[in-house]
């Protein structure tokens, strides 16, 4: 009995040390583990006047899955003409949130796909004056709605920090279209709800993004 008690105490001590070492190892691994974040700039249809920003956050359970947030100004413009004086202002804004999945094609290239949804709004104001510079016509168009789309793209990793990607988001949705015409102090408004399908081929996005890791427990 005298030899059994010291052995038991020694075994308990070794067991406690093993558990403590294992817990310390897991804690260190959790501290060192990082979640990748990415911030990028986008241009649409290779037009520097159509741009957007995008932010992506890696999911905890899968390194090839990201949650993404995008804000885009695909159209901001102003034009005027002196002959039969006219002015035209237009802006097209959209935002989206969605999931992005990445499939490795080789060591640098990945295929991107995933579901996206969000709101969009477009506003256009046109005015036409007569020769005496008296306004005779004013037209306002306001469209807003919700859409759901599916991301399809290719990403090329330049290095561990930067990458380039090209993507499109074919989508379907509903929107409200409202047109108001004013002429000689008379106003006429027409409004309607419409469903739509948009292949988005005119808004292919080219992205340059920067990635960085944030330590997590």
Image (tube, helix red, strand yellow):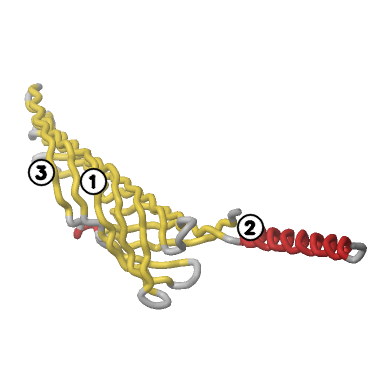
> Considering the numbered disc 2 on the image, is that residue within a helix, a strand or a loop?
helix
113 in relation to 160, above or below: above
- Residue at 35%, 75% in the rendered image: 105
Task: List the residue tagged with mark 1.
Answer: 147
71 in relation to 145, above or below: below
Earlier sequence position, callout 2 versus callout 3: 2
Q: Quadrant of the N terminus?
A: bottom right
Residue 2 seen in this snapshot: yes
Extreme residue toward the right, this view = 2
Q: Nearer the viewer, mark 1 or mark 3?
A: 1
**Residue 26 position by quadrant:** bottom right
Q: Which is more toward the observer, 215 or 167?
A: 215
Residue 116: where, in percent of width, then height? 30, 51
Q: Are marks 1 and 3 in contact (CB under 8 Å)?
A: no
**Residue 199 position by quadrant:** bottom left
Q: Are marks 2 and 3 in contact (CB under 8 Å)?
A: no
Task: List the residue tagged with mark 3.
Answer: 83
Residue 155: where, in percent of width, then height? 36, 68
Mark 1 neighbour class, 10 Å CA radius: few under 14, some 14 to 19, many 20 or more:
many
- Residue at 40%, 53% in the rendered image: 67
């Amino acid at each position: 009995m005298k030899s059994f008690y010291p052995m038991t105490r020694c075994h308990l001590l070794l067991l406690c040390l093993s558990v403590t070492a294992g817990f310390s190892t897991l804690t260190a691994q959790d501290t060192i583990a990082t979640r990748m974040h990415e911030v990028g700039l986008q241009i649409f249809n290779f037009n520097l006047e159509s741009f957007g920003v995008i932010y992506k956050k890696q999911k905890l359970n899968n390194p090839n899955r990201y949650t993404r947030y995008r804000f885009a100004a695909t159209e901001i413009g102003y034009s005027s003409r002196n002959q039969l004086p006219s002015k035209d202002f237009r802006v097209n804004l959209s935002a989206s949130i969605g999931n992005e999945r990445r499939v490795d094609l080789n060591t640098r290239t990945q295929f991107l796909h995933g579901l996206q949804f969000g709101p969009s709004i477009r506003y256009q104001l046109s005015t036409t004056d007569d020769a005496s510079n008296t306004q005779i016509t004013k037209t306002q168009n306001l469209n807003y709605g919700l859409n759901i789309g599916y991301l399809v793209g290719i990403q090329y990793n330049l290095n561990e920090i930067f990458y380039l990607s090209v993507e499109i988001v074919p989508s379907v949705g509903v929107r409200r279209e409202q047109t108001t015409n004013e002429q000689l102090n008379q106003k006429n408004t027409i409004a309607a709800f419409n469903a739509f399908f948009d292949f988005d081929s005119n808004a292919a996005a080219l992205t340059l993004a920067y990635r960085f890791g944030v330590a997590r427990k």
